[in-house]
Amino acid sequence: MARGVRDELGSRMQQALTGFVESPHRSVEEAAAVLDAAADRLTEALTEHRRALRADWDGDGEHEPDTEQLRVTLQAYRAMAERLLRV
């Protein structure tokens, strides 16, 4: 997720937290909206990353990747899976 998006979502969450005393319901609505937006951005980023990884090994069907490219791609898959499994 881009730093600007993270900063904006973090700011919105902070505003939701600080506004709780004055408007609890509105604060919870905003926190839910922030979580929804963060989940959407994460889904978009994961989809793009998966698409790029697949292109690294599946390619265009004309050129087979060499063993080194496959090794690097496998490491990238492993790193992404490990990050997701920590969540």
Image: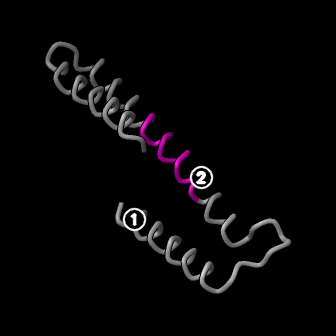
Which quadrant of the view contains residue 26?
A: top left
Q: Residue at x 35, y 24 (%)?
A: 29
Q: Residue farthest to the top?
A: 22
At label 1, which amino acid type do we have? Arg
Q: Residue farthest to the bottom?
A: 67
Which residues fall within the magenta stretch? 37-49
Q: Main secondary structure of the magenta part?
A: helix
- How far apart are the alpha carbons under marks 1 and 2? 15 Å
Dot 1: within a 10 Å radius of its alpha carbon, few (fewer than 14), some, or many (20 or more) residues?
Answer: few
Dot 2: within a 10 Å radius of its alpha carbon, few (fewer than 14), some, or many (20 or more) residues?
Answer: few
- Sequence-first tag of 1 and 2: 2
The x and y percentages for residue 80 are 47, 66
Q: Nearer the viewer, residue 68 or 11?
A: 68
Q: Residue farthest to the right?
A: 62
Q: Secondary structure at mark 1?
A: helix
Say the numbered circle drawn on residue 59: none
Q: Nearer the viewer, residue 10 or 53?
A: 53
The x and y percentages for residue 7 are 31, 34
Q: Is residue 53 left or right of residue 21?
A: right
Query: What colouring does the structure picture have?
Result: one colour
Q: Residue at x 69, y 73 (%)?
A: 57
Q: Is residue 24 left or right of residue 64?
A: left
Residue designated by label 1: 83
Residue designated by label 2: 47
At label 2, which amino acid type do we have? Thr
Which quadrant of the view contains residue 87?
A: bottom left
Does the magenta portion include 21? no
The x and y percentages for residue 63 are 80, 74
The x and y percentages for residue 45 are 52, 48
Does the magenta portion include 46? yes
